């Protein structure tokens, strides 16, 4: 809020639209580099209407695609740097300390992560290679290590012992605090209504008009609508995700609550999009197990789905749980909602607008962007400052989608 009788500042070096984890980390990098930065958020913070809310997200080194696994060491380092800068614990994993400790969040465990799938499945093999390990665990080896899991015939597990759980809400709050500490301006409860491109970009919100020589759009599930305004039809599909928490049949008996690893599946015929799970943080005794997919949704209407609407995800999860996690009940005890914004290939969009090179887009995080937000923010910052990005950006380019450019120009 500007002081009474003082005109509100309206000109910045850079404006970032959307204070989810991607916009907040982008703004953090810009402010750290002494750019006068305005971060705009439509909702009052904190809010639970986008993709970055909730207590937990998986962080892992392993990825089937090497262009993501190559970014993970830097991402781990930047998360640790933020922890050190603020004296805040942001995740529980091997690097951040021992195996079991009592903290604000209760009894937490160094989790690790197992990737489950058919023996020899190409993406599972790529995950194994990304970790530089030879070993795969069969059913007996996995059960010995993690008694809650029952691997089905022909399936194996690859262990990523670097993996852990990020405390998502706390991470978001922390990065925004540091952004402000570096001199950045965060205005929440202020929705962007219009963008006028040009050498100086003009941004009109519900509360004011701002100008900057650079603009970054990280508006999550709302990004597609902005892009239409700017002559681009990006293939972004918002999905409504059922976030499900499952109770142990006998509390403590299945070693699933707080002491299980994270997991994700690849190449299971019963769940081609994948299923993933995390030990309990938000609800003691419940395990978070979700389908890596959901139903198409307009983000403005996310809460209008009738409670009687079919929930195919629950059937897929129940069947997976009865086979692989038999210590859990087969109906969820708690269900919440979150949004993914998917691209057709599941890769992010991190690029300049093809016509307006001072407008940068960070979108399409396809349900796996949180862990990489420190690096994504750095890349979006570099793109906006006209610098050579630190990583090869070919997989994140807008031009990989035919037809998008023609619509723009
Ligand atoms: C259930 C679930 C589980 C996940 N699990 C993992 C995981 O384990 N590991 C992992 O790495 N990733 C995970 N992800 C993915 C990760 O959370 C997302 O990729 C990430 O949060 C996307 O952040 P974002 O900043 O792009 O979007 P958002 O958080 O949605 O931020 C966009 C912001 O822009 C604002 N905005 C939009 N329009 C306007 C406007 N007109 N004016 C001003 N502001 C505007 C929105 O209000 C919103 O706050 C998961 C996602 C979900 C939903
Ligand atoms: O990115 C992650 O680790 C999670 C689990 C796998 C699917 C998506 N999100």
Image (cartoon, grey):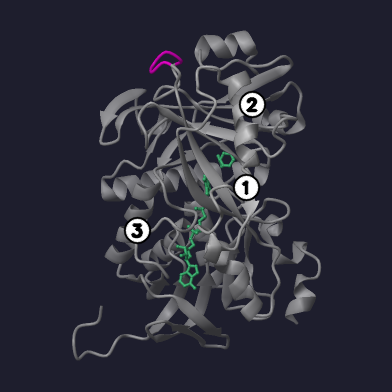
Q: Nearer the viewer, residue 185 or 332?
A: 332
Q: Which mark is residue 46?
A: 3
Q: Residue at x 52, y 83 (%)?
A: 194
396 on left or right of 7: right
Mark pair 2, 3: CA separation: 35 Å
Mark pair 1, 2: CA separation: 17 Å
Q: Give x and y (percent) for residue 365.
A: 59, 54
Q: How many marks?
A: 3
- Residue denoted by label 1: 294
Q: Residues within 10 Å of mark 2 (few under 14, many from 20)?
A: some
Q: Residue at x 37, y 37 (%)?
A: 282
Answer whether residue 286 is visible to the viewer in this image. yes
Give the structural element (helix, strand or loop) at label 2: helix
Question: Do the CB atoms of the residues marked 3 and 1 lie less than 8 Å apart?
Answer: no
Q: Earlier in the sequence, mark 3 or mark 1?
A: 3
Magenta region: which residues?
250-254
Q: Earlier in the sequence, mark 1 or mark 2?
A: 1
Kindly indicate the quadrant of the structure image that contains residue 275: top right
Q: Give x and y (percent) for residue 354.
A: 69, 75
């Amino acid at each position: 809020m500007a002081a009474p009788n003082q005109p509100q500042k309206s000109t910045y070096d850079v404006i970032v639209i959307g204070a989810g984890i991607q916009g907040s980390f982008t703004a953090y990098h810009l402010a750290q580099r002494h750019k006068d930065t305005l971060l705009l958020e439509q909702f009052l913070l904190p809010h639970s209407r986008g993709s970055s809310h909730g207590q937990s997200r998986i962080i892992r080194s392993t990825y089937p695609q090497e262009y993501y696994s190559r970014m993970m060491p830097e991402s781990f380092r930047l998360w640790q740097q933020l922890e050190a800068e603020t004296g805040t614990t942001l995740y529980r994993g091997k690097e951040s300390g021992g195996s079991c400790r009592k903290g604000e969040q209760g009894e937490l465990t160094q989790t690790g992560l197992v990737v489950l799938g058919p023996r020899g499945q190409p993406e599972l093999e790529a995950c194994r290679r990304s970790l530089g390990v030879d070993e795969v665990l069969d059913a007996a080896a996995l059960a010995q290590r993690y008694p809650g899991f029952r691997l089905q015939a022909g399936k194996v597990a690859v262990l990523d012992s670097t993996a852990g759980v990020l405390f998502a809400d706390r991470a978001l709050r922390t990065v925004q605090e540091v952004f402000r500490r570096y001199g950045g301006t965060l205005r929440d409860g202020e929705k962007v209504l219009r963008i006028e491109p040009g050498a100086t970009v003009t941004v009109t919100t519900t509360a004011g008009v701002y100008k900057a020589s650079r603009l970054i759009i990280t508006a999550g599930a709302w990004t597609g609508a902005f892009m239409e305004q700017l002559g681009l039809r990006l293939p972004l599909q918002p999905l409504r995700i059922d976030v499900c928490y499952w109770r142990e049949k006998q509390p403590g008996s299945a070693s699933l609550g707080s002491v299980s690893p994270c997991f994700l599946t690849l190449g299971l015929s019963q769940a081609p999009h994948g299923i993933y799970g995390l030990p309990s943080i938000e609800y003691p005794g419940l395990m978070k197990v979700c389908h890596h997919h959901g139903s198409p949704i307009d983000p403005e209407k996310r809460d209008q789905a009738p409670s009687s609407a079919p929930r195919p995800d629950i059937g897929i999860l129940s069947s997976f749980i009865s086979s692989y996690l038999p210590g859990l009940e087969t109906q969820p005890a708690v269900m919440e909602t979150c949004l993914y914004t998917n691209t057709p290939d599941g890769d992010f969009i991190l690029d300049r607008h093809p016509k307006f090179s001072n407008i940068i887009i960070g979108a399409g995080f396809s349900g796996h962007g949180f862990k990489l937000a420190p690096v994504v923010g750095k890349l979006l910052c570099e793109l906006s400052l006209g610098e050579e990005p630190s990583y090869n950006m070919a997989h994140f380019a807008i031009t990989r989608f035919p037809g998008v450019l023609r619509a723009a120009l």
